[in-house]
Image (cartoon, helix red, strand yellow):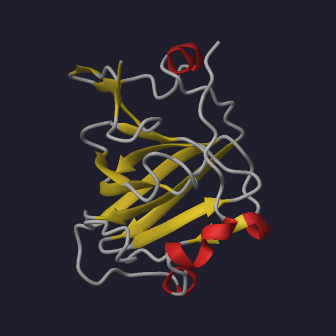
Amino acid sequence: MRFMPAAIPGVVIIEPDVHRDPRGFFLETYHAEKYRAAGIDGPFVQDNHSRSARGTLRGLHLQLKHPQGKLVRVIEGEIFDVAVDVRRGSPTFGRWVGVTLSAENFRQCYLPPGFAHGFAVVSAIAQVEYKCTDLYDPKDELGLAWNDPSLAIEWPLGEPFLSARDTGHPLLADVMERLPVFVPRTDS
């Protein structure tokens, strides 16, 4: 298993060891000790599963008082997964990182609490599973405009298929005072 830091500290791309033979394949999708050694502490308290059609864009979502770290993987199809650093005061505030996750490459992406998350479906269908470090609370959620020009995310699709909720999210600049504050890590 390989843990590769992304361009934004705290975001990690995971490439598991996939054991293939004529019967199919086997892999570990999570191992608490290995992930903890790579800086992904958890604990994970909720698992989510979505199925979406080509052109769907979900996001950008985050929770404020109960921020969620997320460990994302795809079990069918392919997505372009995006993590946006929205922690006020962070050296990488407003920057984003995107990674292709698919059922073929078995990659996972971990984004820590304090990041907005979204993904675009680039295959006919995609099923996405992700673990969360805190429970979902609809009263605590904040969404950001997927096409905010200040973020300039390079989505791999033109006009996405959005939920009614995702069409009305504000720009980053309009919610600055509500965003989480960056707290530097102090490793002892």
Q: What residue is drawn where x is 51% and y is 26%? A: 30
Q: Quadrant of residue 103?
A: top left
On the picture, is 168 further left or further right than 123?
right
Residue 174 is situated, as x and y percent measured from the top left of the image, at: 57, 79
Q: What residue is drawn where x is 31% and y is 75%? A: 55
Quarter of the image with the N terminus is top left
Residue 29 is situated, as x and y percent measured from the top left of the image, at: 46, 29
Quarter of the image with the C terminus is top right
On the picture, is 70 further left or further right than 22?
right
Q: How many marks?
A: 0
Residue 11 is situated, as x and y percent measured from the top left of the image, at: 43, 39
Residue 93 is situated, as x and y percent measured from the top left of the image, at: 46, 54
Q: Is residue 60 above or below residue 147?
A: above
Q: Is residue 90 above or below residue 143?
A: above
179, 145: nearer the viewer: 179
Q: Is residue 124 above or below residue 160?
A: above
Q: Quadrant of residue 82?
A: bottom left
On the picture, is 111 further left or further right than 155?
right
Q: Is residue 54 above or below residue 159?
A: above
171, 26: nearer the viewer: 171
Q: Quadrant of residue 32?
A: top right
170, 174: nearer the viewer: 174
